[in-house]
Amino acid sequence: MQFTKMIFGAMVLAAGWVAFAQELPTLPEVSVSATRVERDNMDLPGSIDTVDRRAIREANPQVNLSEVLNRVPGVAVQNRQNYAQDLQISSRGFGSRSAFGVRGIRLIADGIPATMPDGQGQAANFNLSSAQRIEVLRGPFSSLYGNAAGGVVQIFTADGPPEPTFTTSALAGSYGTWKLGAQYGGQHGPLNAIVDVSRFATDGYRDHSSARRDTANAKLRYDLGSAGRLTLVLNALDQPETGDPLGLTAAQVAQNPRQAVSNAYLFNTRKSITQSQAGMTYEVNLAGGHSLQARAYIGDRQVTQHLAIPVAVQNAPTHSGGVVDLDRGYGGVGLRWTHEGQIVARRFTVSAGVDHDRMEERRRGFINNNGITGSLKRNEDDTVTNTDFYTQAEWQVLPNLSLLAGLRHSRVSFESRDYFIAGINGDDSGAVDFVRTTPAIGATFRLSPVMNIYANAGRGFETPTFAELAYRSGGATGLNFALKPSNSLHRELGVKALTGERGHVNVALFRIDTRDEIVVNSAAGGRTDFRNASGTRRNGLEVAWQQRYGAGFESALAWTLLDAKFRQPFTSGTPPTTVAAGNRLPGVAANLFYGELVWRHAASGFHAGVELRHSGQVFVNDQNSEAAAAYTVGNLRAGFAQRGKGWRLTEFVRVDNVTDRAYIGSVIVADNNGRFYEPAPGRALMAGVTVEVIY
């Protein structure tokens, strides 16, 4: 019944926009590259949304993706108010169970992967201050990026401006939050450069949640003329001693949502991160419509995290301790060939490529003796690699019909070598390979000069991460190599229409069937093990609409309906409990809405806007025994801009959660202590200023 309502709603929306769009002039093309084909978004058979530079920068602190991605339908980004655990990002429900970091979604920065071969990624090194745009791809064409591509989020750093420009910025806000930044960009002959550095700090909304984050991002592009173009991207992150307040039970939230649990103080739960990365891409156009693109990158990430696990539990012979120490090196190479030509006088583009990525980490565990690092409990080398081959073709079959198809063959290999062998804690070394081939195909039909309809279908897969392979059920030693990848079948119908020269709308209706969905089996004593559930189904409707009106008004809307459920019953946990068919997937809201209305006065450089965000109820476990309630919050923002010869000054102020609504901002799926909830802040004020000087 719910899916039928979605279909009916999509038909009504499409019919209304057909009537509206037919009488209006068209917008200029909006080019995107999310499907590896540089095309107007209207002509691509998939769900792709772009967040532009103005939306990223205007009246935002430019710290977290949660500031801007809520305007993309199908995507949920939760700021956990816990910088020790990073953001929660999910796309059409993929990635919603992640307890830390981002999984199930591919993250890419300037063509360089920010997701490891096992599917685990981090968004903290995404630099919003220097971003030109963010592209978000959902649906089956995501699988052309490989393992765990339930969606793809790509960030593109801006080019330096034509003239040398120095920018400084400062902001301050509630809960001891502040940020200072500096940026330089310019064109120097064939070299274009942009360099951005910043320091962000906060006391945190909750107790024991203070954080400091130093970031640096640089992009250097050298024009070699007919020999091509070389781009070097460098970034670094330093985030020391970040407090982790842990989740709260429902009773603790009711008592004091800003508190940290006692164990957070007893074990001084915290995380320190340092990361540095360098990447290079080379692009060259060859004769006859051929082109090549090559990439190479290398990086290092070090993490030390103190967890809250009773010392008696940590002392068990097979336990890995309460201090995680990671020293990770990673890198990869890729090569893609593209040819643009014609078949029977119709445009035809084909590309083929290979990607190889590798992650090596020394993982050690120690006793957390009430906040002090104790004896060694774990010592191993973990390696995961992927080697993928892919091909993709686009053909303009008829003047109003185009086809896009692709195929990717992936091999993901895991290997662990155990060096901590003591007593009954035996050698837990092991290795496993996962191999999958994922096809995707789509068609776009131009119904009128201002409206296209499209359809697509494809397969995807998602391997376990190393963290999910770490433990077997029942306390048994060794890696959980019985855990299988999940496999999904995606189908989608969509409409893309131009609503005049100043607006556009996208509507997508989709169904995703997944078998062997990876779910939490049990969580106890700081150990979480996973299993494969029976099949799941995700039925969804997404609507994105942006429009500019007369008199300086403009609006944006993103609406998602997602019916995500288990299709068959299964058992999990110790002792085993039954998860009923029809239960909703935890961590997934059935209804998401974002809307904004902005007024601009061009002559004075003033703008003011109101934002409204709604999230439906979110269950916290597979049994659906508890849930975070639905909520609606409103935000206000305003800003000024002044210009002079060789300078520009902008100021902004924003108030988030203007009604001071108490609500749960994110949940920790299947937490073994029942501490599922991470409360969001009440009313919060922020103000900032930016100064640009052009030399």
Image (cartoon, rainbow, N blue to C red):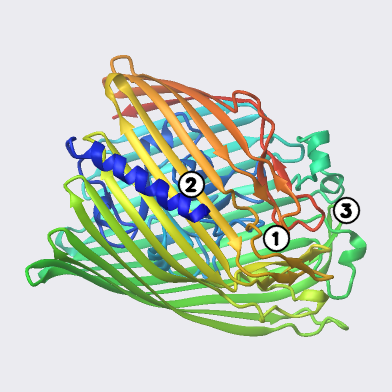
The residue beneath circle 1 is: 622
Q: Nearer the viewer, residue 226 or 583?
A: 583
Left or right, residue 645 beside residue 420: left
User: Which type of secondary structure does the marked residue at label 3 adopt?
Assistant: loop
Q: Earlier in the sequence, mark 3 or mark 2?
A: 3
Left or right, residue 670 beside residue 396: right
User: Which type of secondary structure does the marked residue at label 1 adopt?
Assistant: loop
Q: Residue at coordinates 59% horizontally, 23% vertically from top-left? A: 658
**Which label was assigned to residue 560?**
2
Could one spot residue 648 in this view of the protein? yes
**Within 10 angstroms of label 3, few (less than 14), some, or many (20 or more) residues?**
many
Q: Amino acid at mark 1?
A: Asp
Q: Quadrant of residue 23?
A: top left
Q: Quadrant of residue 656?
A: top right
**Which label was assigned to residue 370?**
3
User: Which type of secondary structure does the marked residue at label 2 adopt?
Assistant: strand
Q: Is the residue 25 above or below the residue 40 in the image? A: above
Whole-Å distance between the Cαs marked 2 and 1?
22 Å
Q: Amino acid at mark 2?
A: Thr
Left or right, residue 675 beside residue 517: right
Q: List x then y, in percent, for residue 561.
A: 50, 48
**Within 10 angstroms of label 2, few (less than 14), some, or many (20 or more) residues?**
many
Q: Earlier in the sequence, mark 2 or mark 1?
A: 2
Q: Nearer the viewer, residue 587 or 29?
A: 587
